[in-house]
Image: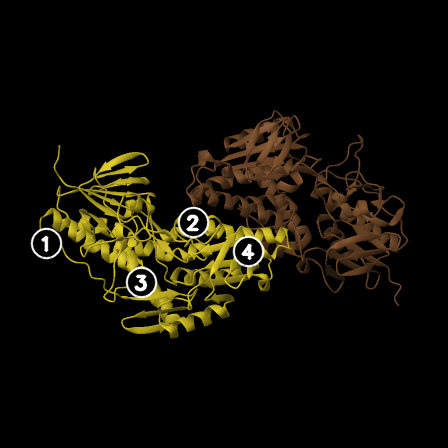
Chain colours: A brown, B yellow
Amino acid sequence: MSNIPKIVILGAGYGGILTALKLQKQLNYNEADVTLVNKHDYHYITTHLHMPAAGTDNPENARVNISKLIDEFKIDFVKSTVVQIRTQDKKVILEDGTLSYDYLVIGLGGEPETFGIPGLAEHAMSIRSINSVRLIREHVEYQFARYKREPHRTDYLTFVVGGAGFTGIEFVGELADRIPQLCRAFDVDRSLVKLYNIEAAPSALPGFDPELVQYGMDVLTKKGVIFRIGTAIKECSPDGVIVGDGEEIRSKTVIWTGGIRGSRLIEEAGFETMRGRVKVDDYLRAPSHENIYIIGDNSLMFNEEGRPYPPTAQIAMQQGVTCAHNLVAAIRSQPLKTFAFSNKGTVASLGKGEGIGVAFGKKYMGRKAAWLKKMIDLRYLFIIGGIPLVLRKGKFF
Amino acid sequence: MSNIPKIVILGAGYGGILTALKLQKQLNYNEADVTLVNKHDYHYITTHLHMPAAGTDNPENARVNISKLIDEFKIDFVKSTVVQIRTQDKKVILEDGTLSYDYLVIGLGGEPETFGIPGLAEHAMSIRSINSVRLIREHVEYQFARYKREPHRTDYLTFVVGGAGFTGIEFVGELADRIPQLCRAFDVDRSLVKLYNIEAAPSALPGFDPELVQYGMDVLTKKGVIFRIGTAIKECSPDGVIVGDGEEIRSKTVIWTGGIRGSRLIEEAGFETMRGRVKVDDYLRAPSHENIYIIGDNSLMFNEEGRPYPPTAQIAMQQGVTCAHNLVAAIRSQPLKTFAFSNKGTVASLGKGEGIGVAFGKKYMGRKAAWLKKMIDLRYLFIIGGIPLVLRKGKFF
């Protein structure tokens, strides 16, 4: 029996894939056994999912086969679904097997948080995976086709996006671009189509620069988006939503982007959590578990003002890098590094050729922001897969 | 007031469009006022609809704007839906107006005949128009997307085509070709997808050459089609169908191609009908109505053995030509021509590169039949729109 330490990484999202890639680079031959577990045999680029969800890009451009990213001579890949994490036994139960670990990295990603709003979990769709965005795209197209056979059912042509955070805003931007195409393809009068974006907070993109928020809303309003800001969804049913002031919006298509929580598996594993997220220590480890690292949407960290960092791809990637460093250091009995988030800025797309963002301490809007967003996407492809991946999946126009 | 005779043509299907095109050519200046009424501003090529229904071709290739076909200086086109035909008043009531006529041509096309099978009218889709085939295409894709989010629901991946006549057989041929593409696009295991073709008659393509029928069924079986021949659908529900021997096939997608009847408008107008079709005289006129011609799926004619001709594009087109001739002759007080159907043969496609058919007194199968089918399609485009239409809409590969 080998006494090589076993590292198991759960989840090949931004955090998990970066951890795996860095470990693959930094570990010496036979220094550790690394196993990456993921539900799918592909990694997907969550920040790009709003496009295939709206149908403005092919879902293939939002995913990469894991076998193209990792070196399977160095890292074992297991395609399976995690069922249970048993910290006392140092085991992970998969739906079709069991893995033992010495070090565990939990990067299982988030789930939609519906805040107990009745009907939302049952009747709303969410933008969270390749399968879920293909469902949204097909669902939207299907409503156009159904409307043409039942022309009195204008509710088929009403689309409700709950939440005007980054995902919500980026998605309505794409869907607003897509609607005129769908109207042409299905011979539907554009004026019959309604696209609502509903946000309970007093502003879209809460916490973002107000001037940029205003610019973004103006752009989207011109594209036909109907905003209901400061308006909560009270209830969701198969027939639509009821909002704060009692208004009923009849719709067969509700897409919820209003919140993310951590994973139920973490709660079930006995960690202390807030909405399925574990407050990790400065080295990204779970409290009282020196051998368990928690990253990405499953981790909770606070900034200097004591506010939690929002779960973004950017922070997950940086955590992956630190996590890999600390795993190698732990194995070598070297000192660990504390994690410090370095904010590179934030850019949101608003559909084709439009965007808003803050980067390098400056504000951007319009074409320049859209271009910046594309550069960020290409940079990510470069980080995980080098030039070949950029050329294969990158969007340059 | 002019005393130029008014000709109103209801429906721009095969029969109506051929009548209009021939009248446009044969009538002299100011010899008659011709008005063509159609629900859509496009003519569609019904014999091509099985392809866009399956998603193997774009619906745009199955329709042509009527304004591209007729000369609007010679023929008035009215886009409207016919509500009532009042033969005593010589008027047609449209949903947004009224038209008076001296001569009427009824070519309103058929409707699905469900033979009173419970649930079929409510829960099955049919291949009958651009809107209906877009619905089928979107519905099928949607089931793949839904399955990926609810992987226990294999009934989403079961597709039932009722009827193995020409439409049924051609449609399953295309859908069998499309399924592997959809499996790839949605990451679905092909072995989970079931495609049933159910026919109550003791043979597929009843009345067709038995050797060709056997060849066709072999081709389609190899493509994965599951035949239930000599098996009636007893009942259709939102959850699937129950067939003759009590077998329940669970499915969310039932497409009914098992029968065509005439138009309810004709029954309501007081004509004597059999399943919405009027037995016309040798000149294609309705009994006791010398000024009303009935063509296409709305007409009933018997061959020399006393069996009704099946409603096909071929007979409708030939009727359109004779109808136009007789209208011109009637206006000019010249003798009318009797209609005689000249059977040019029949070819059915079985998906890409495969087909069966009888033409020029010979049997064809495989690539040659598929090529023949394409030639027939191109010939039709040429007849109605000349070389430019062939180049615009023709499929050459």
Instruction: For the residues labelled 4 and 2, say whether their Cβ atoms are less than 8 Å apart.
Output: no
Q: Which residue is mark 3?
A: B376
Residue density around tag 1, few if under 14, some if 14–19, many if 20 or more, within 10 Å? few
Q: Report if residue A75 is visible in the image.
A: yes
Whole-percent x and y of residue A314?
Answer: 71, 42
Q: Which mark is residue B335?
A: 1
Q: Which residue is mark 2?
A: B132
Name the amino acid, label 1. Answer: Pro
Q: Is residue B280 left or right of residue A177?
A: left
With respect to residue A197, does B373 lie above or below? below
Q: CA distance from mark 4 to mark 1?
A: 56 Å
Dot 1 falls on a residue whose secondary structure is: loop
Name the amino acid, label 2. Answer: Ser
The mark nearer the N terminus, 3 or 1, is 1
Q: Which residue is mark 4?
A: B251
The mark nearer the N terminus, 2 or 1, is 2
Name the amino acid, label 3. Answer: Ile
The mark nearer the N terminus, 4 or 1, is 4
Q: Name the image quarter holding the N terminus of chain A.
A: bottom right
Which chain does the residue under circle 3 lie in? B
> Looking at the image, is mark 3 or mark 1 nearer the viewer?
1
